[in-house]
Image: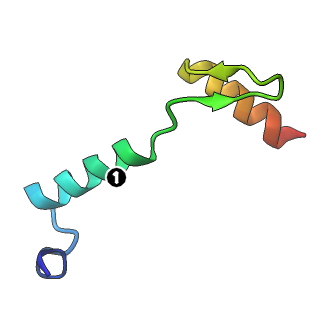
Amino acid sequence: MEWFREGEKNTKFFHTIVKGRRKRLKVNRIQNEEGEWLEDQEEIAEAAIDYYSR
């Protein structure tokens, strides 16, 4: 109910929700085609670009 009352105003409540969502949706690691786990953000980005480029 609080979300409906507060909406997306620039409130502490809104920013807390956004921070939690960002943390939950962040990709911490992925597995490449060779089966190796990548945890470095640059490696994750490169692997994703390579995968979707093909």
| Residue 11 in sight in this render | no
Give the quarter of the image for residue 30.
top right
Q: Nearer the viewer, residue 8 or 52?
A: 52
Give the quarter of the image for residue 29.
top right
- Residue at 90 percent across and 40 percent down: it is 54
Residue 47 screen position, x and y as percent? 73, 28
Q: Which residue is mark 1?
A: 21
Crowding near pointer 1: few (<14 within 10 Å), some, many (20+)? few
Give the quarter of the image for residue 33.
top right
- Residue at 85 percent across and 39 percent down: it is 53
Q: Nearer the viewer, residue 35 or 52?
A: 35
Position of residue 44 in the picture relative to residue 27 (left or right): right
Q: Is residue 25 above or below residue 13?
A: above
| Residue 38 in sight in this render | yes
Q: Quadrant of the N terminus?
A: bottom left
* Residue that lies at the very extreme toward the front in this rendered image: 35
- Residue at 35 percent across and 42 percent down: it is 23
What is the three-letter code of the residue carrying label 1? Arg
Residue 35 screen position, x and y as percent? 77, 24
Position of residue 49 in the picture relative to residue 53 (left or right): left
